[in-house]
Image: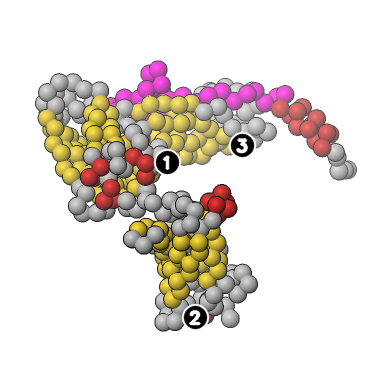
Amino acid sequence: MTKFITLEERDRIADAFRQNQGPLLPAMIDEAVDGKIAYADLEKGLTIRFPFVEGMRTGGQYLVTLSGDDASFGIGGYIQEENQDVVVKVPSDRALAFEGQGARLKYFYLEFEEPTSPTTHFSVEGVTYKPGVDEAVDGVIPLAVLSQGVNLRIRAGSSMTPGALVSIYWWGSNPDACFVKHLNLADPVEELVMPVEPAYLMPNKYGYIKIIYTVLSTSGTWTSPFLELQVAGDLATPRAVHTEWDEYRRPARLQLIDEDGSIPMRLETQGMIEWDTAILIFVGYSRGAEFVLRHRVTASDIAAGQITFGVPVPFSSLGSSAKAWSLIERGDDEALGSPDLYMDLPPDPN
């Protein structure tokens, strides 16, 4: 006989089951010492281990995950023996992907009401480490620092021995804002810090910076992971209000949704001031689908953080794609421009 029960009864039954489910204990890596993993151990592979606790059983299902800044490893399995640690091997080729990163280890025992273990953190030694820019925030070099310069910082890996030759390659999306620098290390160092002048930043507004370096030493030649950063500009890229996969798809997929017969587009007011004229330029693939829309910026627009335009064109007139960009007109002689937004259109079901 079965019956429906209340939430309180459900929780009481679940609590009774949990009484026989010992708390999951943290997983460990055999090769780690004080939370640090040596590069030499990566070359041999790693051994993950977590303890058998009360409530587990032979045949119980688990999933182990090791996550880094730029790498991940996951594997599932079934417990083979009672009262024995569960051991999972990470092959050397997968372990080496964690070089020079922080790593987070946890596992899931899928038969427990609370199936997630505590997380264990590790620092993995690198022959080289990914370079960094001190002033970057969430992968973007802010507009405010472009005129001041930034600090490029490289943590010294085990390859940076005295006498090593370090070559740093700074690529900017503007070809006039690139450089290559070579350093010969006379003494042991913990990190290299290089000031980067505005001349290598300002021309790359709205673009990208890519940084990579090599180390030539008695132990061999090594190439670092590369760092890519976006460089902020005065204005944000226009956005279509109705798009699919906008953050991940390039170009954005414009959904066939209109509002009062118009395609809604949005400009952030970043870089705008009251009394500016905000201009949205929208161009479809087909001739006759070109629009220049103007709006005088108000204090309420600045407070709202965005301005919405309606582009008065049917989707059938756009063709297969469209693009949009914006300008700010400020007085007679000053104008600012935004990056382009590229969009494609799905087939019209009608």
Residue at screen point 35% across, 36% down: 135
Q: Which residues are magenta?
A: 19-47
Mark number, residue 110 = 3
Q: Is residue 209 left or right of residue 241?
A: left
Q: Which residue is mark 2?
A: 317
Q: Position of residue 180 (x, y in %)?
A: 16, 43
Quadrant of the frame with the N terminus: top right
User: Based on the displayed image, in which of its 4 quarters is residue 134 positioned?
Assistant: top left
Residue kind at label 1, given as amino acid type: Asp
Residue 97: in magenta span: no
Local packing at callout 2 (Cα closer than 10 Å; few below 14, some 14-19, many 20+) is few
Residue at screen point 46% across, 66% down: 280
Task: Tell me: residue 312, above or below residue 27.
Answer: below
Mark number, residue 304 = none
Pointer 3 with pointer 1, Cβ within 8 A: no
Q: Which residue is mark 1?
A: 138
